[in-house]
Amino acid sequence: MNIILLGPPGAGKGTQSAGLVARHGMKQLSTGDMLRAAVKAGTPVGLEAKAVMDRGELVSDDIVSALIDENLDAMAANEGAIFDGYPRTAAQASDLDRILAKHGRSLDHVIELEVNVDALVERITGRFSCANCGALYHDTANPPVKEGVCDVCGSTEFKRRPDDNEETVRTRMEEYRAKTAPILPGYETRGIVTRVDGMAPIDVVAGQIDAILT
Ligand code: ADP
Ligand code: ADP
Ligand code: ZN
């Protein structure tokens, strides 16, 4: 199974990917996470990507497509893939077709998380994650059960992304509207797009996604 989770910044792609990993043992391929790891490690890719990410603009297609290709190389043929935050441009969408074919895979579903634009800034400015295991939280919508303690691993260290500020969010939303949303019609022609109400509570969204996959 190979699926794309598509939606603007803050739509819930990362949250739903984590759920799919936990429930179905699929592998999450998040180009955002890969790029942040590269920035942290100070690799050439990270050095090139950092300023672009801080501005909320898109990193070059060649860089992110190469990351996806490498990560698929490391996966078993029967392991399901969730593409989270990739593809984001028409060029990446055609790269993905080529890369999947090379790995003997094909796309099963493109799941679009539909969200109210007005809710996104609040989602993103309230987002934080566990510094140890990466579990995703939200100040009001999804705080840890015990304040200050990660539900998953018990860590008391949390972090916020440097690009999760209101100004950068506006740029990221505009990048989505201008470059990412236009790739949907091509997938629609192929009959593989399903829309999900991303404004519903997290577990309800998860149920809608599971219904698509079965
Ligand atoms: P994306 O990966 O699409 O940018 P995230 O999964 O990181 O989005 O979610 C953004 C923020 O919104 C996080 O703080 C997350 O806890 C919260 N969130 C995710 N899904 C929902 C939901 N269905 N309702 C309310 N808040 C949500
Ligand atoms: P979000 O969770 O808000 O959707 P991501 O974590 O997916 O954000 O991405 C964070 C940043 O990393 C983006 O604003 C962009 O700069 C860069 N990035 C991630 N994925 C891609 C991609 N597929 N193409 C280009 N840039 C990307
Ligand atoms: Zn944790």
Image: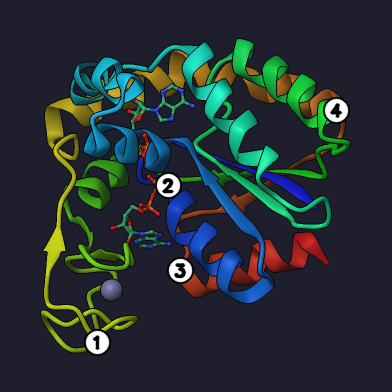
Q: Which residue is mark 2?
A: 11
Residue 144 image-quadrant placement:
bottom left
Q: Residues within 10 Å of mark 4 (few under 14, many from 20)?
A: few
Q: Residues within 10 Å of mark 3 (few under 14, many from 20)?
A: some
Which label's residue is closer to the chain start, 1 or 4?
A: 4
Q: Nearer the viewer, mark 1 or mark 4?
A: 4
Q: Say which residue appears at 35% left-offset and 45% top-offset.
A: 10
Determine whether, in the image, residue 133 is placed left or right of residue 98.
Answer: left
Number of the label disc, if any, that sits on residue 202: 3
Q: Is residue 21 above or below residue 113?
A: below
Q: CA distance from mark 2 to mark 3?
A: 11 Å
The kind of residue on which mark 1 rests is Val
Q: Is residue 127 above or below residue 50?
A: below
Check if mark 1's residue and mark 4's residue have beta carbons within 8 Å: no
Which label's residue is closer to the chain start, 2 or 1?
A: 2
Provide the secondary structure element on which disc 2 rests: loop
Check if mark 4's residue and mark 2's residue have beta carbons within 8 Å: no
Q: CA distance from mark 1 to mark 3?
A: 15 Å
Determine whether, in the image, residue 93 is placed left or right of residue 141.
Answer: right
Q: Is mark 3 within 8 Å of ligand 1?
A: yes
Q: Say which residue appears at 30% left-offset and 81% top-offset.
A: 153
Residue closer to the observer: 72 or 4: 72
Q: CA distance from mark 4 to mark 2?
A: 28 Å
Which label's residue is closer to the chain start, 1 or 3?
A: 1
Q: Say which residue appears at 49% left-offset and 36% top-offset.
A: 85
Q: CA distance from mark 2 to mark 1?
A: 22 Å
Q: Which residue is mark 4?
A: 101
Number of the label disc, if any, that sits on residue 145: 1
Provide the secondary structure element on which disc 1 rests: loop
Q: Is residue 193 above or below residue 81?
A: above
The kind of residue on which mark 4 rests is Ala
